[in-house]
Image (cartoon, helix red, strand yellow):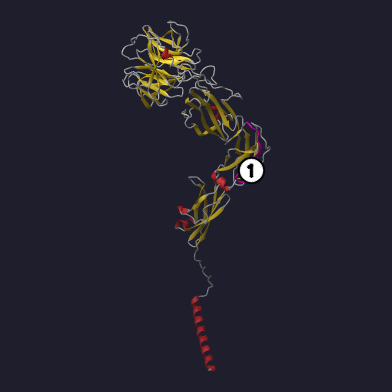
Amino acid sequence: MAGPRRSPRRPVAGGLALTAAAATVLYWTHPAPASAAPSCQQAHLLVNTGTLSGDERLLRYDPTGRLRASVQAQRPYGDVAVLPDGTLYGVDLDNGSDTLYRIDLATGAETATVPISGPPGRMYNALTAAPDGSLLLGAYADDEVLRLDPATGATTPAATLPAGWTSAGDFLTLADDPDDDVLAVVEGSTGDALARIHPDGTTTVIGTVPESWGAMQSGGQVYLAGSDGTVRRVDALPTAASTAPLPTTDVVATGTTLYGATSVGDAGLCADLVTDLSVSPVDGAVVDAGGTATYTLTLDNTDGAAAAQVDTVLVLDGVLDDAAVDVPATASAGSGLQVSPLTGGRIEVGGLLRPGTTATVTLRVRVTPSGTGDHLLRALAVPFGTPVPTTCAPSSPTCTDNPVADLALTQTGTPVGRAGEQVAWTHQVTNTGRAALTGLVVTRPDGGAVSCPTTSLAPGATTSCTSTSTAAQADVDAGTLTGASAARATRGGATLQAVPASAAVAVPAAPALTLTATGSRVGDRVRWTYLVTNTGTVTLHEVGVTGPGATAASCPVTVLGPGAATTCTLDVVLTDADRAAGAAAGSGTASGLPPGAAAPVLATAQGSVPLVVARTPQVADLPTTGVDGTRWTGAALVLLGAGTAALTLARRRRA
């Protein structure tokens, strides 16, 4: 791959002709796979940097120049090569150890090392895969091509570059080439060029190119990794000898120095990737709200002769408007594929799928009941970077459509003012799905009867069912009356449930009290009697009355429902002021606390008890008759004495 960075140009070694003996061990020709496509499928372009900064990278681009991955490299490799089976290797640049490294393509980690047993002291700058699974190896300022066994590190001579040319950085076995030529990037006194090495050992320089330290082949197209960091596509590969510049197109400017390059198509073998997206239940089947759909992306490279580049996007925007992922996407064990997290309704699946193998990626979604989407589950599998189709052809192997059967229910009610009044409920049922429904039934959890004018609903159709319920005092006290309902219908024998609905009807509170006060005298006291009546619509708590002097009356009941009454009493001692006024006046204030209220409702009343004070009766003087009273007194005394004497004499005679 790359030469030493000691000078911008590398010295030119004398060229040696390819020997017949060397030609016999090249094995350039390779059989096409049994079901090979007219041209190889595209794969990513992998380049390794050579900044010598300690931050070496393995950069992966798609053929349009989009960066698809960047991982840390363990060292500045002289070149890298990926075998048809997807195994990545790298070779030392210039550390004198002559070591082959096996590299994890996804992470950049080195997983194995093999010492190279070739001629010592070479600065290897070219490494590529051969169709038979071996590697071709080239060195700076050297015209010899070696064959390297990646398992043992053993090298054998394979070819000699054209006279006057040395290894500039890479080799490729041309795919779909009628002559089965190997393409070499070579360096001469006038710059870099491309040369064809033919199966018979002869060589042909076909044109010059910008200084390039790597080459790769994707989709039958050759790309060069320029020393200036630019990846270029070679637009023509003539067969005739020429030193004229070959036409190239810049693909991407990486902004860094590139030492090597590779792609899975470098050995000239083709992958045969077949992509299929399926769903269970089958494509076109109706999925009920609340049900599940399982998607399987199948990637088949059983007929491929090389690893297939997987770069597929699962587009689930048309699914996730009606569903949510129930089981996340995972790749089949051992496939080596990477599955990205779901982002923006899309999942990316990438990696190399080995020849002769099949892998799957599966995920499951659950349809959201009464979803807000279009009630159609549309999933697609598209190559990364390509436009997403707006339609789904029935025969498409990478698109599925499943209509959603769904039922929506809403409920409303008429307001009420007090307990005992009836609420008229309306239960509106809509077939929001894409399948006809029958056997519609609406129920209430309290067992109330619901009447529906129809039991069949076409897609998009709506019907209004009705029912009534009576407001209880507890509903009025709560300020709201809540009703609930559920709906179900059938589709092909399966029962479809709507999300239950509920509605709350506001009941405005109207608390009110009345109070009357009467009194009666009991000795030196006045007994006040207060009649408290709840004239409002809500139950009142903490009912009480305060009388004269803010003294609390005695109330037998402290909770009053609407229309209920209680009688409270309070004895008050009469005062001199009351007596002086001739009456005892008193006021009362009743209070009751409505449900949930911070302040009570009040009512007041006035009363008066008249007071009567008892007086001593006066005797009138007798009239004067004209006779002196003294005379009458004396006569009385005479008569009294005579009577006493007569009584005494009579008692003696009887004795």
In magenta, the rendered stretch is: 434-450
The disc labelled 1 sits on which kind of residue?
Answer: Thr
In the rendered image, the vertical position of residue 554 relative to residue 158, given as above or below: below
Q: Is residue 267 above or below residue 375?
A: above
- The residue that appears at 54% across and 72% down in the rendered structure is 625
Residue 272: tell me if it is visible.
yes
Residue 28 at x, y percent in the picture: 46, 16
Query: From this viewpoint, which residue is outermost toward the front?
Result: 21
Q: Residue 149: percent from the left, percent from the top?
A: 40, 22
Q: Is residue 440 magenta?
A: yes
Q: Depth check: 413 or 427 in front? A: 427
Q: From the viewer's perspective, is 586 left or right of 490? A: left
Say whether residue 449 is left or right of residue 363: right
Q: Quadrant of residue 409?
A: top right
Residue 598 in the image: above or below residue 261: below
Type of secondary structure dominating the magenta stretch: loop
Comparing 118 with 92, the one in front is 118
Q: Which residue is mark 1?
A: 468
Whole-percent x, y for residue 549 in the image = 45, 53
